[in-house]
Image (spheres, rainbow, N blue to C red):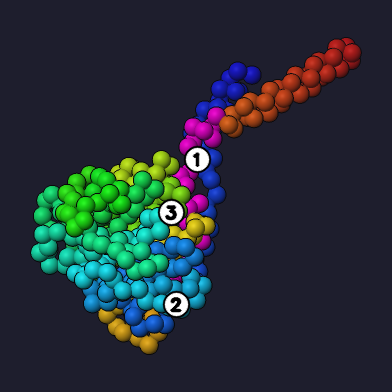
Amino acid sequence: MRRALALTAALFVMFPGTAAAQDLQFGEVCTPTDPGLSELSGTTELGGFLYGMGDSGADDRVAEMDPSTCAVVRWIPNPVDPYDVEDLSHYGNSLWLADIGDNDSIRSTVALTRLDPADGAGELHRLAYPDGPHDAETLLVGRDAIPVIVTKVPSGVSGIYSAGVPVDQLASPGPTALMRVGDVTLAATSTTGGPPLIQGSLLVTGGAVSADGTVVALRTYTDLYLYWAPDGNVVSALMSGPTKQVPLPAQPQGESLAFTENGDLLFGSEEGFTPTTTLPPIGVLRGATAVAAPAKPVADEQQSSLPTVVWVLVAGGVVALVILGSAVLAVKRRR
């Protein structure tokens, strides 16, 4: 009996059960029609509206949109003359515009611009990298309100920079010194999409943090990476590596991500290098926060399942002993 139990336990460890693969529920929520959104680079959801804006050349205003139709309800002027806004986030009741684009690597400072969508008021908060200029398109603001920037690097090794203080405590106009706190390393994938002649799977083009702060998302032109942050620490989650990598439906130049309040993840795109009469739709990965949750550790599965196996084997052993005893008695009676 002990040998049987030991053997069964050993087999259970060697061949642990695996969770059933989750079906990814992709869809489309709406298609922008306003030409001011043809360079859509950043989105965020706040107060029942979806906010979006373009990058350099189209970043002097923010669109307040109906989240179900993508219709522009109103345009809100950017309170600061921008250089190259590449992402959009929010904290509290304010929008935060990430003026962090630097294709030519010439900027001595980058900036975050606060914008109150209620009255259009806001101000500039300059930031300075510790190691020279960087191009970036990703701003992450978690529940601790500390802004984190992930750079856009062709090698696939992108820097993680933190301001170290909450956005509402940044000096204005600054600059506040950024700290390099780590790297995000991505490998090339075979996922199709993105601009032609560009290894789009290596370039981090957007990011977002879930409403409860437990999931961090990064995207490239082709793929989505989900990171688990149970304590709400964005940097720790990025440093721990993604729990899920998800190929995205093909987009011409996908650069925006935004979580909804219920845990869905919206992803949008610029029209790309080939202008069309119809702008790219905003897609959705439904239940993205659930998709991001790490798989249950094998050890936990073994611990929870092994007692059941033991009791089944014990019961089977008892039944076997009863049958064996009955057989022995029957033989004795025949004698």
- SS at badge 1: loop
The mark that comes first in sequence, 3 or 1, is 3
The mark that comes first in sequence, 2 or 3, is 2
Q: Is residue 2 above or below residue 80?
A: above
Q: Name the quadrant containing residue 200.
A: bottom left
Q: Which residues are magenta?
A: 282-303
Query: Could you tell me the amino acid type at mark 3?
Result: Ser
Residue 94 appears left or right of 123? right
Does residue 56 appear anywhere in the picture?
Answer: yes
Does residue 152 appear anywhere in the picture?
Answer: no
Residue 122 appears left or right of 245? left
Label 1 sits on residue: 296
Q: Nearer the viewer, mark 3 or mark 1?
A: 3
- Give yes or no for residue 248 being in the magenta stretch: no
Q: Is residue 252 above or below residue 190?
A: below
How many residues crowd around disc 2 within 10 Å: few (fewer than 14), some, or many (20 or more)? few
Residue 219 appears left or right of 108? right
How many residues crowd around disc 1 within 10 Å: few (fewer than 14), some, or many (20 or more)? few
How many residues crowd around disc 3 within 10 Å: few (fewer than 14), some, or many (20 or more)? many
Measure the C-alpha gap from mark 2 to mark 1: 44 Å
In this view of the protein, which residue sits in the foreground, 326 or 119? Answer: 119
Query: Could you tell me the amino acid type at mark 2?
Result: Val
Label 2 sits on residue: 73
Measure the C-alpha gap from mark 2 to mark 3: 24 Å
